[in-house]
Amino acid sequence: MEPGPEPIRERVPSRESAALDRLRSNRVRPDRARGLGPELGSFIKGVKKMSAQASRAGEAWSAAAPDAVAAVSRVKDLRGGTLTVGIASSADRHAADRWLRTGGLAELRRLARAPISRVRFDLGA
């Protein structure tokens, strides 16, 4: 009985075998299965931070705004440094704007401890 063909590994010299092994190691793909834990955790942390800032801004508005302005307005949102305040009428908006321009914005920023760069009013709140 005649011996069969030699196995491929025995026919390939050792230098070429090492090169093939290096190539094979490059083909091995890492495990791509990952959990959502880290991404979800950072997302929840960001949402809680934004919620806390909006809550503090609402409390600061109620505390700092003059009674006439606070009675006809409410904080709707704080996003990207813009505080959105719903207000009943354009006359009330004018009164709130005058208060903000005469030092009310600085007081609001101090009390809110949140990054408020501007205040936007929505009529009809």
Image (tube, rainbow, N blue to C red):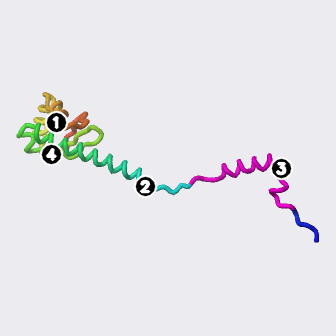
Q: Nearer the viewer, mark 4 or mark 3?
A: 3
- Residue at (14%, 38%) from the top-left corner? 93
User: Which comes sooner in the sequence, label 4 or label 1?
Assistant: 4
The kind of residue tagged 4 is Arg
Horizontal and vertical percent position of residue 14? 80, 49
The numbered disc on residue 36 is 2
The residue labelled by disc 1 is 111
Q: Earlier in the sequence, mark 2 or mark 3?
A: 3
The residue nearer to you, when weighing 53 against 124, is 53
Front residue of 41 and 114 = 41
Q: Secondary structure at mark 4?
A: strand
Residue, disc 3: 13
Q: Earlier in the sequence, mark 1 or mark 2?
A: 2
| SS category of the residue bearing label 1 | helix
Q: Gap between marks 1 and 3, in whole Å?
A: 77 Å
Range drawn in magenta: 6-30
For the residues labelled 4 and 2, the Cα–Cα distance comes to 37 Å
How much space separates mark 4 and mark 1, taking CA atoms? Answer: 16 Å
